[in-house]
Image (cartoon, rainbow, N blue to C red):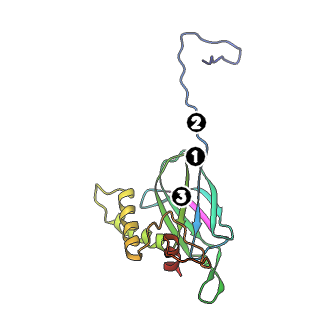
Amino acid sequence: MATAVDSLGHDTPGVTHSFEIDNVGAGTISGVVWKGPIANATVNVYQYDGHTRGPLLGTGTTDANGAYTNVALGQGYNGPLLIEAGLTGTYTEEASPAQVSLDIDRVLRTVVPHYQDGTGIGPVVVSPLTTFAYSLFSWRMDHATAQDTVESLWAVAVGAMQAQFAVVDIEHVPPAPPNLPTSTLSSSARYALVLT
């Protein structure tokens, strides 16, 4: 039990005071940006209502392997997230092989349909397939009915891309590095193959 006192050291027995303590730390997000690993890409995480990009919650940069790790997110928000990655960055074009710089207006996107303040989430993949899913999702949101939600329409869009490209989990399974030898076509190897 704690007793509150004023600046003179007086307490007030029988008087109830209420206050709120926010001891939830900042949330984090981690994952990869992939068209081949995209190094030095800017990763921006926004509040999102399914239609409009909201305030910026956090920003980070990918490493040489395309990974962004523990990007801190601002406190006090629960809801969907929009992740945009690109603006800067380079990747190796597998056919050449040559280093390719992203155009300043080239952005890959994905949605996290539910985020709870203070939680850590990941891995979250941002790739051309999640960007295709985002485009379908945006169209469906523009034609949504009253019972449609961000979560339900995002699941439909992701499911359509996974079925079209025969990739098991475009949101969470990082693609395999392009130079990784494999004797079987795992989910991550299939994902990498589709993106090359």
Magenta extent: 41-47
| Residue picked out by circle 1 | 75
Q: Local crowd at mark 1 within 10 Å, few (<14), some, or many (≥20)?
A: some
- Magenta segment includes 49: no
Q: Element type at marker 2?
A: loop
Disc 3 marks a residue whose amino acid type is: Tyr
Q: Earlier in the sequence, mark 1 or mark 3?
A: 3
Disc 2 marks a residue whose amino acid type is: Asp
Disc 1 marks a residue whose amino acid type is: Gln
Q: Position of residue 91 (x, y in %)?
A: 63, 78
| Residue picked out by circle 3 | 46
Main SS, magenta region, reads strand
Q: Position of residue 155 (x, y in %)?
A: 38, 62
**Number of numbered markers:** 3
| Residue picked out by circle 2 | 22
Q: Quadrant of residue 100?
A: bottom right
